[in-house]
Amino acid sequence: MCGIVGYIGNRDCTDVLIDALSKLEYRGYDSAGIAVFEKGTIKVEKCKGKLENLTNLMKIEGRPSGNCGIGHTRWATHGEPSDINSHPHGNKRVSIVHNGIIENYRELKEFLSKEGYAFESETDTEVVAKLLDYYYNNDPIDTIIKVLADIEGAYSLGIIFRDFPEHIYAVRKDSPLIVGLGEDENFIASDVPAILKYTRNYYLLNQDEICDITRTDVKICNVRRQTVKKEVQTANWDIDAAEKNGYEHFMLKEIHEQPSAVKMTVSPRIKNGLPDLSETGLTPEKLSAYNHIFIVACGTAMHAGMVGKYVIEKLARVGVTVDIASEFRYRDPLICENDLLVVISQSGETADTKAALELGKERGADTLAVVNVVGSSIAREADMVLYTNAGPEISVASTKAYSVQIAAMYLFAFELALVKEKISEDECREYVQALSDVPDLIEKTLETKELCQMAASKLLSSNSLLYIGRGLDYALSMEGSLKLKEISYIHSESYAAGELKHGTISLIEDQMPVIAVVTQKELLDKTVNNIKEVKSRHAMVVLVMSESVKIEDGVADFIIPIPETKEVLMPCIAAVPLQLIAYYTSVLKGNDVDQPRNLAKSVTVE
Ligand code: M6R
């Protein structure tokens, strides 16, 4: 969602802000703006649309020239994307950028209106700007503390005051914000890629910590004005990780990074051929005590949880409930002590997943976060963390994050199955060995690229299609369908193949594409029967299947054979062609692959 940046130092601030904002484009946005100190005044430039529109606007209006300022990419929540709703908001005295939602903005707006303030925009953010002006007493920190006492909701804020041209102020609650630490220059940003070109060192801000940043110093305090000491964090990946490196899109690059990403997730957690998750705090005693496991997440991460459920139940024989985070938090779930709540999140900032985690903790469950972004809110709040080590994922459509999430689910399932004595040590070693071999098989599966491109070309003229599969193949179909929808804008649904006859098969008409996934041999005959049912109603069937599977001629119109491993591990392999089909469909349609319309990479509001 919204991206925040800020800079103070000796460089040209406008250049740095625009460059840093470009590194946050992946978060999704529909307008952009900056506010820069120029000769004692705050100069604001902002407009609807992409950063290019902003730079074009500055060619006409003149670009602010200075060494200190803040910038923003906005993903509209309150008020449509427009010039006026773009950030920064404020007046001659104060200017702010905001990520999050101010929940009580209506009552504050009413109060401020009575105090004589007139509002220009439809945003919740403008209320914070006006409130800062209202409380302003020449002491920025005191002013900010007063405002924090009035506002409710989630926020990270970058603030500048006209009277303090050598300072940026920042604060966060439930929305991410870091302070980048350079030499004679400092930064604020929503995420590490924005500052990587300048520094790898940064502070992570905790709830309601307020920073006063100058070019040589960063002072942090809490709302009682007590000084807070911080440990410097160092980003362990370099700038290349956040660049396209010759690939046409980040999505394609990230699809190709899956072999190494899975290796980075799995290898450090194997000791003597067996899974070892002790680094997370998951001891055998704890594992053996869990009665039930809840896996809660959103979107792709939830689909990884579905794979987790199948594998945990099959191997460890422990009951697993998978929930969509936005439902879990409102359905009064039967979660209690002796249960384990596993939350899965690439960003570690997803608001619903975070709320689910808080609910699980309140109910006394142990909590394990499977998270990619180090130091993210979810990682910090969970009792235990399993980092997925995939490096930055920039494309909005998750690909490598999914693969590493399911790899983490396998490690967890193997260890649990061993502790619960549902598999022997030898069997466990076999599973672990097979999982370690998965990166090579993914590499091989990437060779289906051309076939996937051809399959994609067959989908272009369709308005709607179905993904079908059984068992793990159904779990995977859900992810295939989401991937296609989000970047190709073609409607699709995933169905458990056996469920089609209970209603959905009525949708099948001449040449409607059906993408079937067949990797589970036990279910082969049954799925093939379901495929025949749609084929005989003239569907156009694309079949993604294990290469050794033999099926009669004419069952499918187009086949993508994939390498094989143990059946439980097949989602790691079969995910690849589904990702590539979605990718090429989007490319062929000329869509914005990495930043699909209406979507944000990290959904930090409910
Ligand atoms: O950062 P998270 O993993 O918590 O994000 C959850 C979903 O928003 C995310 O997986 C989304 O569905 C993907 N971008 C889809 O590709």
Image: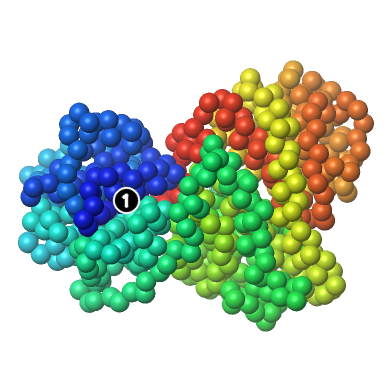
Nearest the eye: 432 or 136: 432
Query: Can residue 234 be seen from the camera position used here?
Result: yes
Q: Is mark 1 within 8 Å of ligand 1?
A: no
- From what the image shows, is residue 120 above or below residue 214? above
Query: Can residue 468 be seen from the camera position used here?
Result: no
Rendered residue at 70%/36% (across/down): 449
Residue 242 horizontal side relative to residue 416, left or right: left
Residue 132 horizontal side relative to residue 305, left or right: left
Q: Position of residue 316 (x, y in %)?
A: 76, 67
Q: Position of residue 539 (x, y in %)?
A: 77, 23
Rendered residue at 74%/32% (across/down): 451
Rendered residue at 71%/29% (across/down): 455
Badge 1: few (under 14), some or many (20 or more) residues near its Cα, within 10 Å? many
* Image quarter of residue 149: bottom left
- The residue beneath circle 1 is 4
In this view, the residue farthest toward the top is: 510
Q: How is the image coloured?
A: rainbow
Q: Position of residue 508 (x, y in %)?
A: 73, 24
* Image quarter of residue 173: bottom left
The kind of residue on which mark 1 rests is: Ile
Where disc 1 sits, the SS reads: strand
Nearest the eye: 65 or 512: 65
In this view, the residue farthest toward the bottom is: 285
Rendered residue at 62%/62% (across/down): 264
Q: Position of residue 180 (x, y in %)?
A: 33, 61
